[in-house]
Image: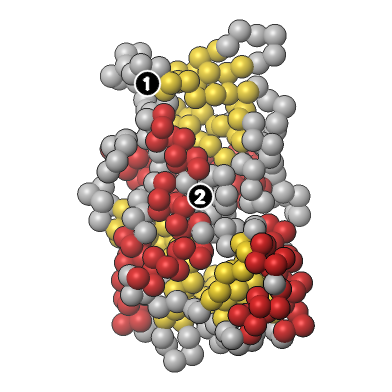
Amino acid sequence: MSQSSRKPRVAVVFGGRSSEHAISCVTAGSVLRAIDRDQYDVVPIGIATDGRWVLEADDPERLQISGRLLPEVDADRAAVVLAREAASTELVVHEASQPPQTLGEVDVVFPLLHGPWGEDGTLQGMLEMAGVRYVGAGVLASAVSMDKAYMKVVLRDAGLPLMPSVTISRRDWAADPQACRERAAELGYPLFVKPARGGSSIGISKAHAPDELDDCIAEAHRHDSKALVEVSAEGGREVECGVLQALDGTPETSVPAEIKIGGDHEFYDFAAKYLPEEHTELDVPADLPEHLSAQLREHAARAFEAVGCEGLARVDFFVMPDDSLVLNEINTMPGFTPTSMFPRMWAATGMEYAEVVDRLIQLALTRDTGLR
C-alpha cells in the first residue's frame, strides 16, 4: 500500500506509573473496542508500572475489571520505542534474541494515561519533542489541570467560582504541622484533603473535625508531596459536563449529568466510581432548570479555554443548595470506562462513543506540531 493511500496508524498508549494505572487500562480497553479498524491501523502500547513501554496485545477483554480484580499492563511483553527518523516517527519493537522489528510510522498517539507521568504534560512534552501528533491537551493545559492548586489559580483568574482551599506540602508539614493545622482550620470544617496531582478519587479523605486532619494529610502525602485541603461543598450536588472541540477548534459542551452516590459512600470514592457492585446512580441528563444547565455549560467552556485545553475535557461542578455553581476541577483525559460519565454525557447529547473517539483522532490528525 502506498504512503498516500494507507490508513492512519494510531498508537493507543495506556497504563503508566501512576496509582491510576488500572483505570487507564480499563479506559484503553473501551477505546480499543471502539476504534474503527476499517479507517485506522491500531497499535496498543502499554506502559508498565516500572515505566517500560511494551507492545501490548490487541485484546480489549483482558483490560476489563473482573469483580474486584483490576487489569494491568503485561510487563513481560516485547519492548517498544518511538524512533525519530528524518521525516517520521516509527515504532520499533525489541524482543529478546530477535533483531529489532519496525512496525511502521505513527501518525497519531492516543494517550489514555491518567494521573502523573502521563496526564500531567510529561508524556505530551515527549511527544512534542518527537514531533508526533496526539489526542488531547498540550503540555501547559495538561500540567495546570493536573495540579489542582495551580488549576485554581488559573480558573480563579478567569472569574470562575471555586471552593476556598490551602495547599500543604510535605516539607511544610514536617517543618511546622501546627501552622498547617491552623491554616486548614481557618477554612472551617468539614474539609476534604486530596493529593494535589491525583485522580480517580485515590488518596482523598474527609476530615470532619480537627482530630481527623493529620490522618487525612498523611494519606494524601502518601500519593503526592502536595496535599490540597479544601472546604467541603456540604449539600452540593455533583454535576459534570463534557467538553469536546469541533474540528474548527470551538469548544462544544454536552448535557450535564449528576452523580448520586449510594450505599455507605459519603463521597464519590474509587469504589463508588469503578466497582460494579456499588450502588452509584448517574442521572444523564441531570435534572436542572434550563437556565442553570446553560450556565453550567458556559462555565465548562470557559474553563476549557482558560487552561488552553485541546481535544476534550470533563469539567466537574457542585450545584449548591441555593442553585449557585462551584467548579470543582477540570480533567483533560477523563475516563472512557463503561461507567464513565464523559461518553455517557455525549451519548445523551447525540454523539455515540465511537463517534467521540473518531472526532478526537481526526482533531489530532489535523493539529499542528510545535507551538500553536
Identity, as a three-letter code, of the amino acid under mark 1: Ser
For residue 42, above or below residue 145 = above
CB within 8 Å, label 1 to label 2: no
The image position of residue 141, as x and y in percent, is 40, 53
How is the protein colored in the picture?
Answer: secondary structure
Q: Looking at this rendering, what residue extends furthest in the left direction?
A: 248
Question: If you read the primary sequence from the N terminus, does the residue marked by circle 1 or circle 2 appear first?
Answer: 1
Q: Secondary structure at mark 1?
A: loop
Front residue of 95/350: it is 95
How many residues crowd mark 1 within 10 Å: few (<14), some (14–19), many (20+)? some
| Residue in the image at 61% along x and 41% along y | 16
362 relative to 73 in the view: left or right = left
Q: How many marks?
A: 2
Q: Looking at this rendering, what residue extends furthest in the bottom direction?
A: 322
Determine the CA span between mark 1 and mark 2: 25 Å
Residue 280, image quadrant: bottom right
Identity, as a three-letter code, of the amino acid under mark 2: Asp
| Residue in the image at 37% along x and 30% along y | 131
The image position of residue 346, as x and y in percent, is 40, 59
Q: Which residue is mark 1?
A: 88
The image position of residue 292, as x and y in percent, is 35, 81
Q: Looking at this rendering, what residue extends furthest in the front direction?
A: 175
Q: Nearer the viewer, mark 1 or mark 2?
A: 2
Q: Secondary structure at mark 2?
A: loop
The image position of residue 244, as x and y in percent, is 35, 55
| Residue in the image at 45% along x and 57% along y | 144
| Residue in the image at 65% along x and 57% along y | 224
- On the question of residue 201 being in view, the answer is no
For residue 302, above or below residue 209 = above
**Which image quarter is the N terminus in?**
top left
How many residues crowd mark 2 within 10 Å: few (<14), some (14–19), many (20+)? many
Q: Which residue is mark 2?
A: 120
